[in-house]
Amino acid sequence: MYQADPRTRATLRWGGAIAALLIVQSLMAAAIFWALLNASHRRTMQEALAGDCRFFAQVDPAERREELREMLERDIHRERFLALFDSRGQLIDGNVARLPDVPADRTGTAVATIVPTELPGKSEDVARLTVCALPGGERLLTGFDLDDAEEALGLAGHALLLGLLPGLALAIGVGLVAGRRAARQVDTVRQLTARIVTGALDERLPVARRPDSFGLLAVHINAMLDRLQSLIIDVRGVGDDIAHQLRTPLTRLRARIERGMREAQGAAEFQQVAEAALAEIDQLLGIVAALLRIRELEDHARRSRFAPVDLARIAADACDLYHPTAEDRGITLVCEIEEGVVIEGDASLLIEALANLIDNAIKFGPPASRVVVSLRHTAGTIRIAVADEGPGIPSADHDLVTQRFYRGRHECGGVGLGLSLVKAIAEMHGFALRFGDRGSVVTLERPNPEL
């Protein structure tokens, strides 16, 4: 037995669904049009019949026969029925022989068979009519011949049907074409995801120069894939950094423990080896924790905790924290802080970034010098600067010092993650990390439209 391939089945499903929707829409539109047409025709006749009743109710009884004759003479198409009857139901004048015994419907009119008197060759006819009482006891029968009305409605129905058939054919064609296109687009996404699962992270959906709705969706999907690829590359980078940076310390640690176990002569020497090993392990754990912390900040995982933060309070707390350290090195720590700077952020992260900059300035600045911490907000810009009297960072190293594990050309303590952490925190809060062209100045700067 022949089995259609999945893409053909998907095309038929999509096309059938769209075609069915368009067919139902066309049928509903035709039904509404037909109902409105019938309602409009019936309403027109009802208004005309009610107008006749009002008119003859206002005409003097002596002049009613004359007015009736004039109206019949103006009816050149012979589609009107008008007749006056007395209180006993006897014909006074008109083109209907007798009153039909048919009750009116809720609209006040009725469809009945009447006996015309002025239509040669016809002994009866069907009309929509109404019978209304007139002042003086007379009754007026007024109505419309339904033959012409039904003929007109029949022509309208045939025209509607002739217009509906091409519409249905068009609906089926459009449905199949749209279904094939939708199935092809879905199949493109399916194939893309299959290739990505196999490891082709650089695959993207094609986007036309003038994208339609699916094209706009493809743009967003591509942006999502770009972000996912970037995150995966970053995760791989963190793993590579950890593996690369821990290999040498772990090798050194193993050699130290092995040598200590071989050379130690007593419990005291074994304890020294263990304490040295613990210190090395703590440093390695610090490296791993710092890398994971930078990764968390780069993912902006803590934005949900943002709250109004007073930067003046942050800067003052950081200065208070490092005053004792600065005094121990003979360094004068000067804080120049302007009040009234409030931003949305994480207070603990901001004080960590500023403390890191102050610690670097005290650590690498010359003894018996000054370190100036300043907070300014002018011309809609917030600037937090930490300056010492050292030579500063060479211009060639400005882009390198924020990379992980970069420690410059001179030997210094640490593992080279401090400025990477500062940059991650700064970018998370909308600050740009800048280094002075001359001298040792590090600045955090961001626009503040509220100022």
Image (spheres, grey):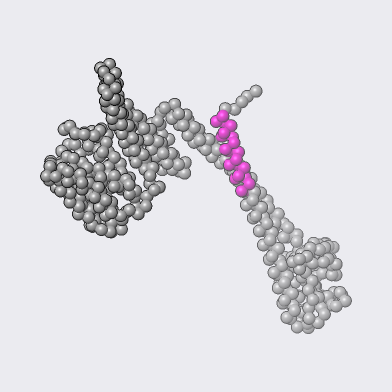
In this view, 80 is above or below 151: below
375 left or right, relative to 175: left
Residue at the far top: name it: 262
Instruction: Name the residue at 58% across, 42% down.
Output: 18
Asked if residue 18 is among those painted magenta in the image, a careful observer would answer yes
The C terminus - image quarter: bottom left
Quarter location, residue 395: top left
Q: Is residue 117 visible?
A: no
In x, y percent, where is residue 312?
Answer: 26, 54
- Report if residue 57 is visible in the image: yes
Quadrant (top left/top right/bottom left/bottom right) for the N terminus: top right
For image coordinates 74% across by 81% down, the residue present is 59
Please give the range of residues in magenta: 6-26
Q: Position of residue 79 (x, y in %)?
A: 74, 65
**Quadrant of the rendered image containing residue 278:** top left
Q: Position of residue 190 (x, y in %)?
A: 49, 32
Count all numbered tags in the image, as a single digit: 0
* 301 drawn magenta: no
Which sits in the foreground, 220 or 245? 245
Measuring 73% from the left and 58% from the top, which residue is drawn there?
150
As drawn, 106 above or below 316: below
Q: Is residue 193 left or right of residue 437?
A: right
Q: Position of residue 139 (x, y in %)?
A: 81, 75
Residue 108 or residue 100, whichever sits in front: 108
Judging depth in this view, the residue of 158 and 289 nearest the camera is 289
- Main SS, magenta residues: helix
Residue under the point 14% across and 45% down: 330
